[in-house]
Image (cartoon, grey):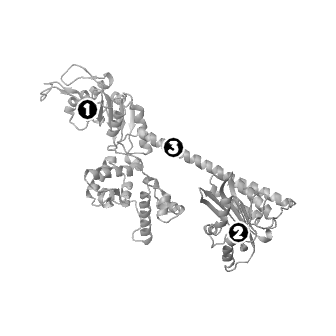
Amino acid sequence: MSDIPLCPAGVSGVAGVPLIKEDLHQPDCRVVDELRLLFEISYTLESSLELREVIRPVLQRMSVVLGLRRGAITLLQRGSVTINEACGLPNEVTKEAYLAACRDIIKVVTETGQAVVVQDISREPLLAERWREESGRPGAQETQLAFICVPIKFGDEVVGCLSVERLVAQFANPLADRRLLSVIANIIAQVVHFHRLADERIAALRDENERLQKQLESVLRPSFIVGNSNAMRTVYRHVEEVAGSTTTVLIRGESGVGKELVARALHEQSPRKGKAFVKFNCAALPESIIESELFGHEKGAFTGAMSMRRGRFEVAAGGTIFLDEIGDISPPTQVKLLRVLQEKEFERVGSHTPIRADVRIIAATSRNLEEMIEQEKLRADLYYRLNVFPIYVPPLRDRKSDLLLLSDHFVEKYAGANSKSVRRISTAAIDLLTSYHWPGNVRELENCIERAVLLCRGDAIEAHHLPPSLQKKDPSETAPRGRLDSAVAALEFEMIVAELKASDGNMAQAARTLGMTERQMGLRVKKLGIDYRRFRRGDGASDE
């Protein structure tokens, strides 16, 4: 490589190639142009937090001011190319192809950390082949080109290289050109180092944030509840805040959202853990026996009372009682329950002896208690005693990001219970699950998955295994039928969704598998209206 002088500071030739002395008497206009160029490059590099966006404008400005034939900047990260940008290339030559043609020169520069100056690329073996290819193209003019490549270094680390090509006729002072390029490379190196530090800091903060979030979730989220959505995290925080007290809690939410599991979480995280957790559905029994079930009765208290019987409050002594559907209790029972809340004591039916109630009360309802008070179906004083610390459990339609987690959990649960080999849910079935409005909430989802597991004969739940209510077409949908473009779009949608599911929502990985660039994947996902975040998985165990 005799034509490639490796140029340390102050040297411009090796292996017998004569040194070119720098002309110290350059016209003032050149100095002014160089200073203006350095200022503009510095300003451009600092104008964006995304380094990839400003590299090309830097090259274009250099090309205009210095009259370059072409220029290229290659930045490295752990030895691999992270940014490769070039300007002045023919239309048929890509920047990747140009980088490949110059890779041997770039390798010399990045490995030695020294500049390379080639005064005629047609005489340099490492570049002559590319020169012959370009000069042989139709309409190409045979011109002599000089090539300068300088390292982009921060300290002793080479983080890339900057290369330019100029007409030999304009190459009157290669040492001055190399010096200017070295200064520009140094500016780029400082910016690259700053971006690296920022990226490392951001990555460290992101990792720390993820670690803290997982730690927080593992601490706050009960092991038997599935859900990482923001709405459920609010529930977990409220549970953690009130669990250690004896305060009465009112859990509100639609039927089937999992209110009983929240009550269980309150008990499990309280000092009463290990004591009795008694569940009682106020709407499950006739009004005539609810009082006896709650407070017990004495022998002979009413017809059929053959012996004394302890009520649920006595059974729950020292522990927690969960009163589900509290809005369905009768007015007489409301009065006695109010006494338990106020005085912490009750009497069995047929007895006048008060019994101390050392019980934590957790109530739940799907009713609108405020409307019931207006209709005089619920005592206002009882409502205020119950509504000390309300916790609202969101419906499934407001926590769609948890739907796949819940579905996978129920698949695993019922596949194991029924000795089935079902392991996953097909893309078509996922689309039906996510587009449905789930009026029955988590309970309805669980029933749907249980049915699908029983019907499934393979390892994947398909769309036809789901109930007919999920497969009805929305009247608002007006997608064209029988057209080629709609069929192609449907196939494209299914393939992309399948890869996103396989990669847990990793767009870059799915793009590589499908043979697409990340930009192409982003455009298609946006066009097809696919939310890749819904395929991201998290930890979880169960829900109601």
Nearest the camera: 517 or 162?
162
Label total for image: 3
Judged left or right of residue 202, residue 298 is: left
Q: Nearer the viewer, mark 2 or mark 1?
A: 2
* Chain-order first, disc 2 or disc 3: 2
Q: Nearer the viewer, mark 3 or mark 1?
A: 3
Q: CA distance from mark 2 to mark 3?
A: 52 Å
Q: Quadrant of residue 284?
A: top left
The residue under the point 45% across, 40% down is: 215
Residue at which label 2 appears: 1
| Callout 3: SS | helix
Q: CA distance from mark 3 to mark 1?
A: 50 Å
User: Is residue 366 shown to the viewer in this render?
Assistant: no
Residue at which label 3 appears: 209
| Callout 1: SS | loop
Asked if the residue at tag 1 contacts the one at tag 3, i.e. Cβ–Cβ closer than 8 Å, the answer is no
Judged left or right of residue 10, residue 155 is: left
Q: Nearer the viewer, mark 2 or mark 3?
A: 2
Judged left or right of residue 358, residue 138 is: right
The image shows residue 411 at horizontal and vertical percentages of 32, 52
Residue at which label 1 appears: 330
User: What amino acid does circle 1 point to?
Assistant: Ser
User: What amino acid does circle 2 point to?
Assistant: Met
Q: Label 2 neighbourhood size at 10 Å, few (<14), some (14-19), many (20+)?
A: few
Nearest the camera: 251 or 154?
154
* Chain-order first, disc 2 or disc 1: 2
The image shows residue 58 at horizontal and vertical percentages of 70, 59
Image position of 407 with respect to 345: above or below: below
The image shows residue 309 at horizontal and vertical percentages of 18, 27
Residue lying farthest to the top in this orientation: 353
Q: Label 3 neighbourhood size at 10 Å, few (<14), some (14-19), many (20+)?
A: few
User: What amino acid does circle 3 point to?
Assistant: Asn
